[in-house]
Amino acid sequence: MASPKPRSSARTTSLRDSEESERLEATSSWEALEWFKIEPVSRSVSHVNLDFLLEAEELIVEGYGVVLVNTDEAGTLIVTNFRLIFLSEGTRNIIALGTIPLATIEKFTKTAVRVQSTLRQFDKTPSRRLLQVIGKDMRIIVFAFRPKTKQRRAVFDALLRCTKPASLRDLYAFFCGPSKFNNTNPKVRLLNEYFRLLGKGSYHASMSMIESGSFTFSNDEWRISSINSNYNMCPSYPFAFIVPRGISDEEVIQASTFRARCRLPVVSWCHPVTGAVLARSSQPLVGLMMNMRSNTDEKLVAALCTQLSGVMGERRKLYIADARPRKNALANGAMGGGSESSSNYFQSEIVFFGIDNIHAMRDSLARLRDYLDTYGASSSDGMSSFLRHGGWTWGGGNLSGMSASVSTLGDSGWLIHVQNILAGSAWIAARVALESASVLVHCSDGWDRTTQLVSLANLLLDPYYRTFTGFQALIEKDWLAFGHPFSDRIGMPTIFGSSNVPFELSRQSSVGSFPSSPMRQASGSFTSQAPSSSHAQNLNNYSPIFLQWIDCVSQLLRMYPFAFEFSSGFLVDFLDCVLSCRFGNFFCNSEKERQQCVVSEACGCLWAYLADLRASEGSSHVHYNPFYDPLKHNGPLLPPAAALAPTLWPRFHLRWACPSEAEAGEVEGQCRKMAIKFSELQKAKEVAERKAKEVTIAMESLSADLRHEKQLSSSAVNLAKRASKESEAIKRAVQSLGCKVHFASTGDCTVGIESYPVDNPQKFASSPSKRVPDGTVQLDEKSDLSVSITVMAEDAIPSNPVAGVCETLCPLRTRDGVCKWPDAGCAQLGSQFLGLKANFEAFDQLSIYDSYFRSE
């Protein structure tokens, strides 16, 4: 899990002598210091920028001028209540290799190495003060301190206090609290998984359902029992579990007495179609002579063999898989345990897997860790191997050292153990998937090897467990609910006392034949602080069982890259979170203990933290597997035996010893970069398409406006044509009265009346105009066609010549003296007056309206 980088801040130099500080930064090597000339220095914590600290993380002690021997880098070493932090002297950035959570530290020792420069100066050269830190995450770190400063003693004492808290409440997770990573009650999630297994996925569990005990659903074959709701029957089992429907709670209690630690056979997974089940338990208490029996236990185990679907009267076969070597199972009989007899269990077959116990796994991982440190690029002894220096020697010797190192890797036994677990799980999955048989798995106590086999077989059988949500449900069901002792195996404090893991043990006590790192130096002498005998006794319970299972999951992910939603990077971050004890999900040894400590309410949730990380970047986050295809592997994974040849897990095993090689050849990373680039191009395409759509809409809008303008123009042309026709009609009407109408190019219109003694013809100017307040319509000089019409009062209007003639001479005029033509009698009689000649035929062809002759 990557550590946050501190923000840069101004501070004084870490060394008292500025010249020595400059020389240290220039060489980045602790060998450049003149150790015998450096005086003790006291520093205040206020000089260090603390922006890199997490919430509720407090600084305890710090040491300046410390050198990380693995990389020959100088800096500042800080101990907080959560981590051991190493800051680079030059950049003030957190160095990941030298930064480790306190709970991840397996042990640490103080050492002193005297380096001989010349024969005469051997006694005058001061020894180098070293602090070796061995982590549970495969790293070995060595820090070098200046002599006579007492900084190493201060850091060592702080580690003793902080890495071995007196109680569980002293862990950082309780100081930090849930923060924004709140944890819902794990019991609710467990019941929801039970409902899914029973085909009752439409039901949703709640705390009220748990408090009322109304969660005991069932189907045709299986039911949820609440007999252990108070943890009285079995303290290490969950409050609810699945048993055969035909077995009563009284029989469940009786059967539990025949199994070690009362861990009776219960259902872990059931096939939704065939009805085959995968069950788990602890060893039966058959005794040394293997002659002890229990009718209720045999009835319960027989009930796991339900009838085969489609075959009347035929019951399915039962395999009892004992994870231990046969000799170990027989040896347990001397202590009252042992294994089943196939003659006592109906239609059953006993199979032994030969997986070693927790002590063999612990020693194997220690040997693997030392192998990686010895031949890695960042060795804790500060010496360069062939891969680090590029020399022609390999592993400190000649080319023959290559075969020796390979054999050393094989001697560690780690890959053999991983292969055995993979093979056993694949065998179990094949029996359930191919034969529709039920399998009961157990070891001695049923919480270490049993959990590894059952959960890995679940992962192979059910595609749901290969998703983020399913993987969480699987771990919470088979590891947490069924009582894997995380406090003992990982080395955390229990609710009963202090930690069970020693922190001040010499390296030789658990690493086999490997020499410790400081002793591999070419010259000099080595001394170490003697280990505590009480610490050595407490080491007995620590074992990397869960780490080994995650390693097995990574091997399956390597074999089936399309089958898993999560990536190898997710497994590494998840394992780091578990080992760091930053969150409370994996505290204590059982569900009962976590409930007593109120862990889910008092501490943050690991699952919420990881989900928040994924949500920050979406599907491009490093936790997502870019190759995941749920349709490609939507059934069980059944790897053949030839494919179960494990390799080192580069992302985890090599990340500290060979950091560049750990990331080299990562197809996931390259594919993720391509996916990110594709996503960026997809976004750019969407932006371009959006802009193109906007342009298209704008063009459509402009086209609509243009069409509207065309319509307006067409309407205006039609109006103009209509006006022209009306003007022509008026012109013809006036001409029919014997008048001459002349339209000038200027827009003036001249009307002359024939046979009327008028000196000057009357002119009527017509042009586009504007009406002014006094009633005059003025000419608009800017217009092509101008109309000027002046409206005057009636008394000012001169008499029309035609009207005057009509009024004088027409005998048919009205009394009011107003001419009523064309309704007058003169028009009707076709009379002719004073030379006025009307063309009545033209009148008949025109549409004449009174408005043509009315005054405005």
Image (cartoon, helix red, strand yellow):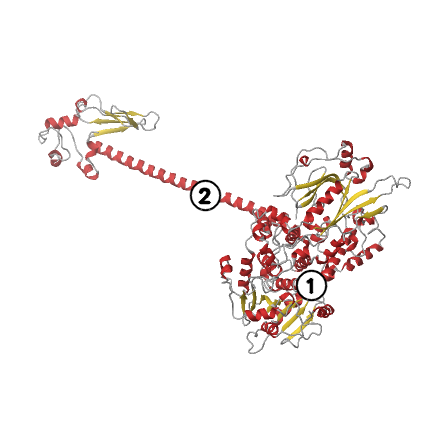
Please state the horizontal and vertical placement of residue 159, each as a whole percent of the image: 71, 46
Give the quarter of the image for residue 832.
top left
Q: Residue at x 19, y 31 (%)?
A: 854
Please state the horizontal and vertical placement of residue 222, each as a whole percent of the image: 54, 69
- Relative to 467, say whether 47 is above or below: above
Q: Nearer the viewer, residue 115 or 421?
A: 115
Residue lying farthest to the top in this orientation: 759
Question: Which residue was labeled with disc 1?
Answer: 421
* Mark identifier at residue 645: none
Please state the horizontal and vertical placement of residue 573, each as a whole percent of the image: 65, 51
Q: Amino acid at mark 2?
A: Ile
Give the quarter of the image for residue 638.
bottom right
- Mark 2 or mark 1: which comes first in sequence? 1
Q: Nearer the viewer, residue 313 or 566?
A: 313
Q: Amino acid at mark 1?
A: Ile
- Relative to 661, say whether 123 is above or below: above
Query: In the displayed structure, does residue 685 sit left or right of residue 411?
Result: left
Residue lying farthest to the right in this orientation: 120
Helix, strand or loop under label 1: helix
Question: Which residue was labeled with disc 2?
Answer: 697
